[in-house]
Image (cartoon, helix red, strand yellow):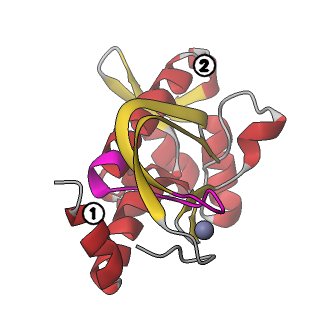
Amino acid sequence: MKCFKCNGAYQIKHGKFKFNDRYVGSIVVDNVDYYECSKCDDQLLPVETAKLIENKRKELLDRYLQEQPIKEFMSAAETAASLNITRQALHKHKRINKGFIYQTTFSGNKVYLKKSIDQYKKNGDGRFLINLPSKEQCGDFKFGHIEIQGWDYVQNIEQYLKSHKTLVDITSLSK
Ligand SMILES: [Zn+2]
C-alpha cells in the first residue's frame, strides 16, 4: 500500500499508539494495530483501533469532568433556562447530547459544565481542551492525510473508508 503523502509504503505495526487530541490532550492505547509509512512516518488506523481510541477518549473526558468542582456545573433545569429552551428540548438536543456541551453525571443527575455552556452560547461549540495543556498536546488528530478534529472522528473515518476503496483494502488486511 503506497503512502498518500510520499512514495513510501505503509507497514503494519503493533504496539503502543499515541496521539494528541484537541479536547482531552494525550491519548495512549496499547497493544493495537496501526500502519506507518516507512519513509515519512504518516500513520493510518484500522477501524478497530480508531474505535478503541474513541472509547479511551470518552473515558478520559469523563474523568476530567469528574475532577472539576461541582460548583462549575449547572443542573439540566438551569442549563435549559440558560439556553432559553425547555428541559425536554435540552434532553433531545442532538448536538448537545453529542457532547458539544460537556456533561457528566453526579449522584445520578446529569450536569453541564458552565464554561462549556457559555462557550456554546457564543459559537455553538462548547468543547475546549479540558486537560491541562502542554506544548505537545495542542495538535489535532491526524488520520492518514486528512486531519480530524475531535469528537466526530470515528464517524469521519467510517465515511472516509466508504469513499476510499484503497483504505478499505488496507484495513481488511488486518483481519
Ligand atoms: Zn509516506
Instruction: Tell me the residue at 33%/56% (across/down).
Output: 46
Does residue 127 appear left or right of residue 55 in this picture? right
Assign the N terminus to one quadrant of the image: bottom left
Count of labels in the image: 2
In the image, 114 versus 16, the foreground residue is 16
- Where are the magenta residues, as a range? 37-49
Instruction: Say which mark, if any, is on residue 61.
Output: none
Q: In the rendered image, is residue 111 in sight?
A: no
Disc 1 crowd, CA 10 A, few/some/many (<14, 14-19, 20+): some
Secondary structure of the residue carrying tag 1 is helix
In the image, 72 versus 146, the foreground residue is 146
Disc 2 crowd, CA 10 A, few/some/many (<14, 14-19, 20+): few
What residue would you read off at disc 2?
A: 68
Instruction: Say which mark, if any, is on residue 171.
Output: 1
Sequence-first tag of 1 and 2: 2
Assign the C terminus to one quadrant of the image: bottom left
Residue, far left? 175
Does residue 55 appear left or right of residue 100 in this picture? left
The residue carrying mark 1 has its beta carbon less than 8 Å from ligand 1: no
Instruction: Tell me the residue at 49%/68% (across/down).
Output: 9
Of the residues shown, which amino acid type is indicated by label 1?
Thr
Residue 47 is a magenta residue: yes
Of the residues shown, which amino acid type is indicated by label 2?
Gln
Give the image quadrant in which the ligand numbered 1 is located.
bottom right
Corner quadrant of residue 62: top left
Instruction: Tell me the residue at 52%/48% (across/down).
Output: 101
In the image, 100 versus 87, the foreground residue is 100
Measured as percent of width and height from the top left, residue 44 is found at 46, 60
